[in-house]
Amino acid sequence: MGNNMDISRPQILQLPKIHDPRGNLTFVEGEGTVPFEIKRAYWIYDVPAAAERGGHSHHAMSQLLVAVGGSFNVNVCDGLDWRSFTLNRPFEGLFIPPGFWRTLDNFSSGAVCLSLVSTRYDEADYVRDFEEFKRLAKANPRRL
Ligand code: T46
């Protein structure tokens, strides 16, 4: 992780990759690799091709999303603008700080989305209403 990383913006992080003729290996090691302490991991899989996940923002949670298999898109909104990231490399992660709406779609067959996050699961941390999200984003602007 670069020391001059702007942790207020979503961005792709290059993760360590150990090349090996037996197969490659990537790891994440605490705050040395991601800009937050990892408190939880979950993964999303068996997603039908037309399905969409996400559709919310978080008050406090930071996360790193990795396509450990296959590919999918992550569409991020700051309340005004949208930006889409295609995740398809197991050695890249999309860092998303709090305060950004996200949807995930266009999952390939067999895609697996690993999510490393900074908080324990807490439904109160979710903003699941897009109009409420836009009101919050206007009051506390964040930029893509
Ligand atoms: C996010 C995107 C990328 C739990 O009980 N524990 C957990 O750690 C999680 C993540 C979910 N759940 C329960 C809550 C719901 O009853 O699992 C159910 C599905 O969760 P949700 O509809 O929030 O799933 P997604 O794929 O829309 O969103 C998830 C994360 O919740 C979210 O933080 O950023 O993946």
Image (cartoon, rainbow, N blue to C red):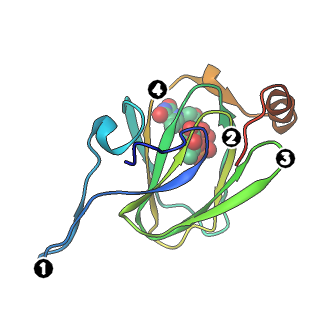
**Between disc 2 and disc 1, whose residue precedes?**
1
> How far apart in space, not on screen, are marks 4 and 3 (Cα)?
26 Å
In the rendered image, the vertical position of residue 121 relative to residue 26, given as above or below: above
Q: Which residue is mark 1?
A: 21
Question: Which numbered marker is on residue 119?
Answer: 4
**Between disc 2 and disc 3, whose residue precedes?**
3
Q: Residue at x 87, y 29 (%)?
A: 135
**Between disc 4 and disc 2, whose residue precedes?**
2
The quarter of the image that holds ligand 1 is top right
Assess disc 1: are there few (<14), some (14-19) or many (≥20) residues with their C-alpha within 10 Å of its C-alpha: few
Q: Residue at x 49, y 40 (%)?
A: 63
Q: Which residue is mark 3?
A: 80
- Is residue 21 left or right of 78 when viewed as pictured? left
Instruction: Name the amino acid type tagged 2.
Output: Phe
SS state under label 2: loop
**Between disc 4 and disc 3, whose residue precedes?**
3
Q: Nearer the viewer, mark 1 or mark 3?
A: 3
Find out if the beta carbon at label 4 lies less than 8 Å from the nearest ligand 1 atom.
no
Instruction: Name the amino acid type tagged 4.
Output: Thr
Q: Nearer the viewer, mark 4 or mark 3?
A: 3
Spot occupied by residue 122 in the image (x, y as percentages of width and height): 54, 22
SS state under label 4: loop
**Between disc 1 and disc 3, whose residue precedes?**
1
